[in-house]
Image (cartoon, helix red, strand yellow):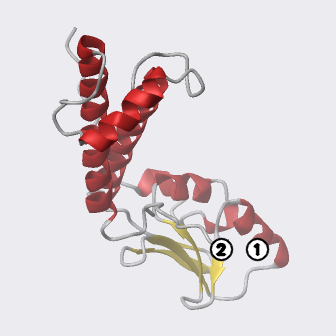
Amino acid sequence: MSYKNNAISSDDPKAIEKLTEKLQKCEELQTLMKKANAHYKKYGTVKGCEGISDEKAENLDMSARSVHYHWEKQPFPSYHITNNGAEIRRIKKRIENLEANKNTEFVGWKFNGGEAVINEDKNRLQLLFDEKPSKEQRETLKANGFRWAPSDAAWQRQLNPNAFYAANRIDFIKPENGERPTDLQPKEPKKSEPER
């Protein structure tokens, strides 16, 4: 049996566009569910509710009256609305993070025996070594989320702030100037405190 994977990868160049589209659908669904529940509460049926066909309304009415599906007597149980609301907040946060990463100009560095390179096209932090790392070094790289990419002849991981935090933990790729990889990266402007 095969499953359709609807996941939106952060590596996808159209990730923000796809997430925005998904967010719009979730928001429309949220509005529709609330409207259908309010209509059912007022009239005892979903028929006549704007945006819902008579066939769909009949199914929702039957579901609302059935004890088998849920204890709430409304077409859309409150947990559907709550879960969809959580999904809306999650997608908004993800879009915000992707936009922040997109607007951040990460920088690479040289280390003893190689160089850390920012590959924006592939959305990767890549580590290029002059010589093959030792077995112990390779294990350390793997333990910190770096993977060997033969096509690029580099150890790499997804380009995001976590990649630099992982690089901080690896002594043999520390920048030559003694700073930590996170210290080299531009700082995000602090968000202003909300008014109370």
Q: Is residue 86 left or right of residue 190?
A: right
Residue 59 percent location from the top left of the image: 40, 37
**What residue is shown at x 53% (from left), y 59% (from top)?**
163
User: Helix or strand or loop: what does disc 2 sit on?
Assistant: strand
Mark 2 / mark 1, whichever is N-terminal:
1
What numbered label is drawn on residue 147? 2
Q: Position of residue 51 (x, y in %)?
A: 19, 39
What crowding class fits label 1: few (fewer than 14 Cα within 10 Å), some (14-19), or many (20 or more)? Answer: some
Kindly report the distance in space between the C-alpha atoms of the residues bearing marks 2 and 1. Answer: 9 Å
Type of residue at label 1?
Arg
Picture quarter containing residue 62? top left
Residue at 32% over, 52% down: 22
Residue 191 locus on image (x, y percent): 27, 31
- Tell whether 195 sits left or right of 174: left
> In percent of the image, x 38 and y 32: which residue is there?
60
Residue at the top extreme? 196
Examine the image and state in which quarter residue 17 appears.
Answer: bottom left
